[in-house]
Image (tube, helix red, strand yellow):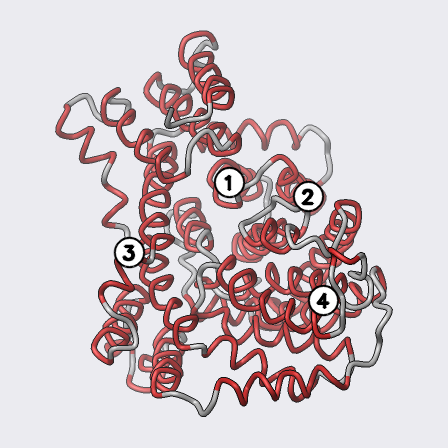
Amino acid sequence: MGFKALPAAVALAIGLVIWFVIPVPEGVTANAWHLLALFVATIAAIIGKAMPIGALSMVAIALVAATGVTNDKAAGAIADALSSFVNPLIWLIGVSIMISRGIIKTGLGARIGYLFIAVWGKKTIGIAYSLALSELILAPVTPSNTARGGGIIHPIMRAIAGSYGSDPEHGTQGRIGRFLALSNYHANPITSAMFITATAPNPLVVKLIADGTGAQISLTWGTWALAMLLPGLVALALMPLIVYWLNPPEIKSTPNAAQFARERLREMGPVTRGEVIMLGVFGVLLALWAGLPAFVFGPGAAVDPTTTAFIGLSLCLVSGVLSWDDVIKEKSAWDTIVWFGALVMMATFLNKLGLIAWFAKSIETGIGHLGLGWAGATALLLLAYLYAHYAFASTTAHITAMFAAFYGAGLALGAPALPFALMMAAASNIMMTLTHYATGTSPVIFGSGYATLGEWWKTGFVMSVVLILIWLLVGGAWWKLLGYW
């Protein structure tokens, strides 16, 4: 059987109840309500893991087209169902994931990690900062936060922990491994928040913000990166100290770690041609995404972010760093294009059919009656949005289900559009801290056994509070200085 029976049955039941049992509310069209039924059923199936998210997305596309909830004509319905596959943001993430394969294939990611540890690895806390800096360097061109935190940084962290005999199987994880594993993990949400291209759902946030403001706010790569720079750096500076305080390692000094890293670098040998090319591609991507040509030569020289990603992939293919087989086999990229396209399509038409505006108005009315003022009301919205992630095993599902309505409600309650958008964008990444199933990186690192469930959840909750305060206070002041409000 291609699906899990119980979660599939639950999702189907939820969809049928919304479609056939719950009356269509006043102010909502039947088509919008029926699309909501399909949408909620899809999100429920994703949460319950009834099928892989890509397979569920194919089913959702088929249902949207077959039911005609967006268009009465069959040809128009299938065109609507497939409409998001021409969305540049979807291809930005998919192509960027393909490029990130070159970082792993050439060994550049591992070399960066070992270089930092060779310099700062004489103390346990220094290793944690080295892992965090490696995350930061790789984040702009690694849209799979799972590949970055779980596939590149985590093996380095485990090798270092193992060199000190810190192994969960032997009950010695407290020596150094628990602290390093949690530091490894909590760098991931911070770096994901710092760049549009640091995790797959961020472009979805950009689109939902643009839709919610009638395209008055269209966050560019450079605007996002500049806005998140200072709070992100402060968060990365404080994170290892907080994790150290909550989970103090038994081994405080690690002079052998620097030596271990140098030995690994010697084993890797001189920097290869592939690594040099990847560094060059890295530089081209950052320069174009940051808008350097437009800054130097004027607006006419601007390069679209998705065009930039295709340029980077082309350079990797022409130089031979990546082969076409590498691109074809990068399943996570093609999978992301499929599920991202389906979810964006459904969210777009929920907005076009007026459902999001109706839901936002309902939230606004409910919170408005509390008499909190816009600051208190939007703070309540933000916290409700953030901590609802305890119920989600996918950041994409959470963002798709809740972001547009909560952002729209905040605007209606009087929140300044750009700062509130940036806070919601930050919260969409901060929520990854909470659980051992919060994002793809979580089960990889939690599954290695260095931290218990209690240690993971305690550290995650504390970090969520610290990070939201950093973005509110440091981010708010920084955005004021930048003239964003």
Residue situated furthest left in the rendering: 75
The span from disc 2 to disc 3 (Cα, nearest Å) is: 31 Å
The residue singled out by tag 2 in the image is 383
Indicate the secondary structure of the residue bearing disc 4: helix
CA neighbours of label 3 inside 10 A, class few (<14), some (14 to 19), many (20+): some
The C terminus lies in quadrant = bottom right
Which is nearer the eye, 402 or 285? 285
Where is residue 396 drawn, in percent x and y?
Answer: 48, 44
Residue at the spot 45% in from the left edge and 22% down from the top edge? 8
The reply to whether discs 4 and 1 touch (Cβ–Cβ < 8 Å) is: no
Q: Is residue 46 above or below residue 426?
A: above
The numbered disc on residue 408 is 1
Residue at the spot 45% in from the left edge and 66% down from the top edge? 142
Residue at the spot 60% in from the left edge and 28% down from the top edge? 365
Q: Is residue 41 above or below residue 164?
A: above
Viewer-nearest of discs 3 and 4: 4
The N terminus lies in quadrant = top left
The residue singled out by tag 3 in the image is 88
The span from disc 1 to disc 3 (Cα, nearest Å) is: 24 Å
Which is nearer the eye, 102 or 63? 102
Indicate the secondary structure of the residue bearing disc 3: helix
Instruction: Indicate which disc, 3 or 4, sits on the residue closer to the N terminus.
Output: 3
Q: Amino acid at mark 2?
A: Leu
The numbered disc on residue 180 is 4
Viewer-nearest of discs 4 and 1: 4
Where is residue 63 drawn, in percent x and y?
Answer: 29, 24
Viewer-nearest of discs 2 and 1: 2
Q: Amino acid at mark 4?
A: Leu
